[in-house]
Amino acid sequence: MRLRLLICLAGMAICVGAASAQTAVQSMDELYAAAKKEGQVVFGGAIKAEHVTKLAAAFNKRYPGIAVKYTRRSTEPMVQLIEAERRANRVSFDLLNLTEPGDVVRWMKQAFLAAVPLPDTDKMLPATFDSNGFYAAISVTPMLGIYNTRVIKPGEAPKSLKALVSDPKWKGKVAISRPTRGGTSSGALMNVIEAVGRDFLKTARERDILLTRGNEAAINAVVSGERPVSWGVSGYRAIEARAGGSPIEIIVWEEGVALAQFIGVIPAKAPHPNAARLFYRWLMTPEGQELLVTNANFYSPRKDVAVTPLKQPPLSALKINSFSNEKVVGEGHALAVEFDKAVGL
Amino acid sequence: MAMRAAIARAFEELRQEWLRSIIVGIAILIVGWLVFYPLGIIFEMGLRAEGGSLTFAHYQRVLTEPGLVSALVNSIIISVATTAFALVLALPMAWAVARTNMPGRQFVRVSVLVAFVVPNFISVIAWILLLGPNAGLINVFVRETFGIARLFNIYSMEGLVLVLTLSFYPLIFFAATAALDNMDPSYEEAAQMVGAPAWRASMGIALPLVLPAIVASSVFVFLEAMGAFGAPAAIGHGARFHTLTTEIYELFSYPPRFELAAAAAAPIIGFTILGLILQRWVLGGRRFNVIGGKSSAARAVDIGWRRWLAFGYCMAVIFASVILPLLILLRTSLLSRWGLPISWQNLTLKNYAAFADTSTIVPAALLNSTLVSAVTASACVVLALIIVWIVERTRLPGRGLLTFTSTVTFAFPGVALAVGFVIGYGGPPLALFGTIWLFFIAFTAHRFPFAFMFMRNSIKQLSSEMEEAARVSGASWLRSVVSISAPLLKSGIVAAWMIVFAVTLRELSMAILLYVPGMETLPVAIYSFIDNGTFEIAAAVSVVLILLSIASMLILRWITGKAQMEL
Amino acid sequence: MRLDRLGGAFDDAVIGTKRHVRPGLMAKLEIDDVTMSFGDVVAVDRASLTVADGETVVLLGPSGCGKTTLLRLIAGFYRPTSGAIRINGKTVASPTLMVPPEKRTLSMVFQSYAVWPHKTVFENLAYGLRLRRLDAKTIASKVAEALATVRMDSYAARYPSELSGGQQQRVAVARALVLEPEILLFDEPLSNLDASLREHMRFEIKALLGKLGITAIYVTHDQNEAMVIADRVAVMNRGRIEQIGSPEDIYYRSKTDFVAQFIGLANVLDGEVVGATAPNHLKVRVERIGELVACATSPSDAARAARVLIRPEQMELTATPKPGMNTLKGRVARRSFVGAQTDYVIDVNGVALRVISPSRNADFQLSQDVLVNFAPADCLLLGV
């Protein structure tokens, strides 16, 4: 076991070394020239197809001749698909957009990913990119608290995580996406633990928290009133649900909220490597970022993009607790497993 | 010339025999392979250490690791409780329907069939919507009317037992009514002669006589509860407990722990085999009616005013198991947000539009489900025709084993069997995982018994002389089967096809482990929507699935007035 | 003991058969020492039978005697465990060789008729002809001819479900005939018909077979049916052929206890040979009855222990003795008037004898003393 770990680490070191050797940032013109020959980029992610169509139109205006082929899948099935392809020794995607840091970090260690350094990481939020360029958040969204406005009057909603997890009033009132479910959910748990301390795990079982599979289900549990509060769900979904007429209101915890990342990666063996890089780099420009924010209701990881989704307050106005992907994968996952055990699963 | 004719004739004979032997041989090999390969894989995998050496470590972990142990214990508790409650629910109904003059007996029979058609992964949606601790419609009503916090919390072990009981009691009902229908009424009359009141005579005499059927169907319910996946997954998660099937599912999610999953599947398979042995033992040489059967002309017992009591009871069970869940599903499928009260703004048909929306998995799932079910049904029927022919028409040694092999997967929990298929076909030389072929193979293995039992029933009713008459008229064996037996068995074949189609259409517990993105079936789609908490679309897809299932059951009944399946 | 006795009967059967092949007629079908076992159960036990061209042989026996198995062996549905079956001198079945039924140039009428319900009467008949690749015109004329033979010509377009049992029966016969088989097999074809129709059909089949001159093997458990239809009857018991002979032969010259009891009514008495009065006339002492003069069919019958058969209708009841006959003194123990005949049970010193006499001959009352007379020629010594 220990030996295997050592081998693994050694392999990682070699990969990282190899990657940093070619960190030179290519110019967009060079990339475009090469990308035109490839003619297309195969993109996969969880963004709605209609939003990607708009993005692609803007991209093609600037860089004609490169078709954007998009497949929409949420992260878990997307990862399954990629793994199935890998078993068959096939790579069909050029660019992927995932919410699961665990898979991204694993793929990086397995040398499945290409290093594509970005020129202006200094303008990005901390912990939203890999220093070697293996990945960067294409968009981010805060893991916002929500409550049901039919069940809880606005003045009575909890304000702090501390109160939420210790006040008897909220016992049996909380629904969350099961933390072992994925990075966004374990990030939200980490945020809670950092705010209230590990002792919470001891009482977690008594709190009678409803666990759902995924953020959408947690929001639905709150919307239906099955549990009137959640300590953290994907912000963009919450914003969209509220805009869509669901009786929910948003809580930004006094202790701060976690930030979920929609991570962009390019497989090392991507069939259209240059087009992939060109599209990815363009998505990360202020132009691409603004389009993403206005269309898909994400926040931008770039500090220099002022526009916010659905006129929400800017991230700078929220208290954001940033966790690096490595931290979410390591500590966050361990916490999630512990939490599972603590509540009896 | 004569010489050449003789040689040609000898060759022809050889060919005749060969063709038949080859077809028979291949069919036996296929069935054996379908059943024993995945089982072998499960046991082998559970015994294999990382280096490939033999180990009992995985089995040991199943029995020692707290999570797995509690899952095993939970599964046993839930299965026992479900069986007990199903008996309590079904037996009075069966007796009232088969032996008394209760009004509405035919309605009860048909309604229970509908209850059977609604799979537990669908009825669980309805029950969550009805009995969710805070937002469940019944609990909300109780809270607002009586000020009681809640009537019942569906997110609990009891909640799961409730859903499974209402889902599986039809099995006991079918078996018990079939047995009571066929019972000679003179037994009861004799008891009345010695002075027992009519209803008491009936109860006292009937019960022991149908005991074998009851025990056999109870075993069946126990196994079904043990193997259920949809409802435990939907409830267990919220209530924070695992059953063996949900635990196996988790062991399969990334990174998969196949060895442990295989070891965890072993107890389920063990229970299944034990259960089947118990069933055989209890039944002796008798047959056990699983589905359908004729209604009797046996004399009904007049139970006086109590018939209204019985009627009320039956209606209550049917209301709870059929009408209420279906109404809730229909209602939910028409809402834009299920948590919101019903109003004109909240009413919509957009959930059904998912069937036309290619950005959702629903259209592909509908196509996949139809394709998989149709191919599975066809494969099962062709295979069943040959195997049943061997069993019923030849004196081949080992027919008993062949029959056993052909029926054993009947009670096998899909999740457990799927473990064998996923591992066994995961890599070269049989790398079929992720293709639709594995669906065909696995579903055929799992559902073949349905076709076998239906076909066996109909071939038994067909005199072998029909075929022989064709032989003496000059037809070869193959020709006699194709031009005489197959057309004459048409209704049996169609019935077998329809039943396999119907049960495959609603199969979740295997599909959930077999599917890869893009290969979702309707049940998997429903499950994913439940998973997301988007109950509206889940309900809409469920309504369509239930309608499809009811339609195939109706066609089945229409084709064969007395469609039935015996074990 | 029993087996030995049957063994003897079997040898006789073979001898009998050979004697009965009519000169000038070719052996169409030969069943040569055929045994068929299903696991431990021996269904047909070393059966031998030779059937001449144009001959009708009835296999007669109780259910489970192996007659249907033997027929199915001939048809080709089973492969014999040992022995051989030859048609026109060519072996069609042996443990190593198995010509499938469709290649045996024979045809069969089944117990359940097996008229295919999804085909019209015409299609039922045409099926086999089509397999022989005949042209449509020939098929139509052959079918019409065959239907006319069984007087079903106007039913060609009907489905079997529209026909009565008797009509289906005729269709089944026509379907077998239309193929012009060398051998026609009947497996209890009349057993599903009601009694009067059965009576009628057996004469019809007999006439048909006579008219067509076809070789036929006919299985039945009904001795009357057998007697009407058969040129020769083969009586089977426990897988063995006990006796083969003309209907008269097996009735009047039954060779075994089983045959005697199975065919018609029989008084069988156990006794002991004590001497001879003439070469074929033996003195047999029967306990409590005394000495009788019996007739032996072959010298081998001269054994110490013996069993005699007297048919009830071959005994005559009188008040005074008749010369040259065996005469026994008895008393009427039972008397049933059944029309033309009266059925008596006569108690002869504690032994009950069944006597059937024409009602007009004499009328004896219950408990009346009476003499039972029968000729030595009608007192047949059976093998023991």
Image: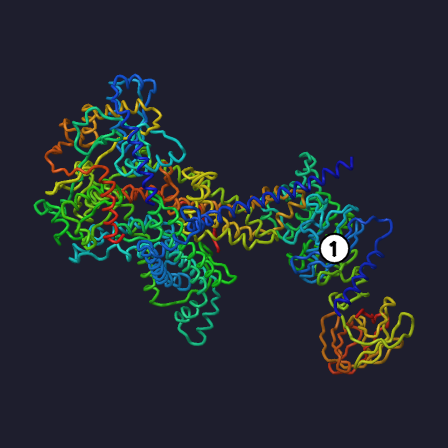
Q: Secondary structure at mark 1?
A: strand
Vertical placement of residue B74 versus C149, above or below? below
Vertical placement of residue A230 versus A315, above or below? below
Is residue B268 at all visible to an observer of this figure? Answer: yes
Vertical placement of residue A63 versus C231, above or below? above
Q: Can you give x and y, in whole percent of width and height, for residue A217 in the image?
A: 24, 43
Q: Residue furthest left?
A: A155
Q: Quadrant of residue B208?
A: bottom left
Is residue B550 at all visible to an observer of this figure? Answer: no
Q: Nearer the viewer, residue B288 or B520?
A: B520
Vertical placement of residue A39 versus B495, above or below? above
Q: Nearer the viewer, residue C41 or A118?
A: A118
Q: Can you give x and y, in whole percent of width and height, for residue C340 in the image?
A: 75, 69
Q: How is the image coloured?
A: rainbow
Q: Residue furthest right?
A: C278
Q: Residue at (86%, 66%) from the top-left corner? A: C298
Relative horizontal placement of residue C309, taking residue C112 as reference (left or right): right
Q: Nearer the viewer, residue B343 or B247?
A: B247
Provide the chain ID for the residue under circle 1. C
Which amino acid type is marked by label 1?
A: Val
**Dot 1 alpha-carbon crowd within 10 angstroms: few under 14, some 14 to 19, many 20 or more:** many
Disc 1: which residue: C34
Q: Can you give x and y, in whole percent of width and height, for residue A160 in the image?
A: 11, 46
Q: Residue at (79%, 59%) from the top-left corner? A: C244
